[in-house]
Amino acid sequence: MAEKKSLGKEFTKGLIAENPVFRLVLGTCPTLATTTSVVNALGMGIAAMIVLVCSNVVISLLRKVIPSKVRIPAYIVVIASFVTIVQMIVKAFVPALDAALGVFLPLIVVNCIILGRAEAFAGKNSVIASAVDGVGMGVGFTIALCCMAAVREVLGAGTFLAGAQNLLVLFGDNVLGGWNGFTLPWTEYLTPMTVFILAPGGFLTFGVLMACANRLAESKGKPRAELGGCQACPMAKNCALLAEGKGCSEEKKEVETV
Amino acid sequence: MVDGKKLVVSASPHLRTKDTTSRIMLDVVIALIPTLIAAVILFGPRVLAVTATTVITAVLSEYAARKVMKRHNTIQDFSAVVTGLILAFNLPVSIPLWMAAIGSFFAIVVVKQFFGGIGQNFANPAIAARIILLISFGQAMGSWTAPLSWRTDAVSTATPLAIIGGETQEALPSLLDMFLGIRGGCIGETCSVTLIIGGIYLLARRVISYKIPVAFIGTVAVVMLIAGKGDLEFVAYHLMSGGLLLGAFFMATDYSTSPIKSNAKIVFGVGCGLLTCVIRLFASLPEGVSFAILIMNLLVPHIETIMAPKPFGTVKEKKAKEGEAK
């Protein structure tokens, strides 16, 4: 690795500057699908974060053992093991969350964020840096999901943190004293806009929040995340191909000639 | 130099029409006014409250959005007024005013200004806003007030399309009532006669071309003739019910969301007509004009690409490749 960053920076970059959802635009599918309520988003974010940290650590430990030609299958095996563990834990202790997230919980296996961090970071960096990177990215993912879910739940259902009890069912049925999320006071007079719970509202919220995140990162002197060209790619500085002076398109050509 | 005057040399174009965006938009407003008057007679003064809400919110949203985005202001081109008016025409008269305001805000800020303002929007703002409201507030957007009942007690009724679809057992209004607009429906879609007058005014002023409305309405007529097994009355009900006339004359012809080339316009109109018929005949919704126009709006760039004319003297790419191979 060319540049050495402090651990603090490895952590904070995942929050806004390289937020996996809003800046790297990874993991869009679970982002849109599970952000209909804050509780679901929180559950999804925490589950993904646990898998991310564990897989980052293990992959970083094994980075000298795994041959580079079969690294992707090797990473998937590691990630899938942790996803299986997390899925079993969720099924056992938070069954309501398992029902709400459905197929998106096992789909963490192919979540771009986790594979992307394994490929771009854990495969090249020390164990501690990888763990910190995993925590930072996981927190960034969770924050992003919760931001989206807060907008969508408040506007689309008129509630906030509804079903919070379901997350804590492990600690007893009445741990929150019967409280189970807010119902916003204006829903008596104003009907919530159902569209925000549906897919169009998800995309709309996603776009607007992405613009806000770009604005935030820009005001800190970071360049705008633009698509087009290898240099604009958010993975550019971690890209092995670009370091060799090639782009993704060149790799494709090589594959074709082989 | 003649008589001491300087000879003006300027770049082309040298001939300009007097058409400006604001003039065109003003023409659309003029064309919509008869329908507005008819709607006030049919559905009462609340029509004016709904219309005022959408128009004022649209203009304010446009002003605020341009201000926030630090772009030059475009409220003087009347396009926001037109969007507000058309949106109001697409709402039931009983809609709560705050919903109408949200729809107007959505049309201008999200559909129009987020994509760059007038001329840049990919979909008709009023249609997109109507669909957002329809998805969000199904109940409020689906409760219809009987025409001419506003002076006494407002009576709820069903739209002719819902009656044709067999959702309720109410009697269908007569064809004359349909023509005059004495039926349930959105504010501006019921009165066929004033919509046709407005459409003819726009055609006469050459604000819109006849191709989209004719292709749109013609396709619906042909498909309904086949679907109704030659029953002309069935065709007439379908042509005058729902938002077909409003959609064909005022919404499908929107400049920035309809094709430019004339043959592409016909494809666009036929597509709108076919989708409308498919939704009316087979889908679970009684009415499909707004969805049909929205879907075709999204296809406009592709229609334009496919229908691109071949420059004179050039050979098609395929043929050119075959020639090289030989």
Image (spheres, rainbow, N blue to C red):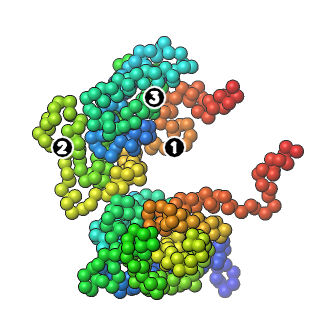
Tell me where residue A258 appears, x and y as whole percent.
Answer: 69, 25
Q: Would you say the residues marked 1 and 2 are in contact, meaning their CB atoms lie under 8 Å apart?
A: no
**Which residue in the structure is indicated by mark 2?**
A180
Q: Amino acid at mark 2?
A: Asn
The residue nearer to you, when weighing B241 against B259, is: B241
Residue B146 image-quadrant placement: bottom left
Q: Residues within 10 Å of mark 1 (few under 14, many from 20)?
A: few
Q: Which residue occupies 39% across, 85% down?
A: B37
Mark 3 residue element: helix
The nearer-to-camera label among 2 and 3 is 2
Kindly indicate whether the residues beneath marks 1 and 2 are on one polypeptide chain: yes
Identify the residue at the far top of this view: A65
- In the shown orientation, is residue A217 left or right of residue B281? left
Tell me where residue A232 appears, x and y as whole percent.
Answer: 51, 39
The label number, if any, that marks residue A227 in the structure image: 1
Q: Amino acid at mark 3?
A: Leu
Tell me where residue B15 appears, x and y as whole percent.
Answer: 64, 78
Earlier-in-chain disc, 1 versus 3 = 3
The label number, if any, that marks residue A161 in the structure image: none
Q: Kindly identify which chain the residue marked by label 2 belongs to.
A: A
Using the rendered image of the protein, determine whether residue B71 is visible from the camera's viewpoint. Answer: no
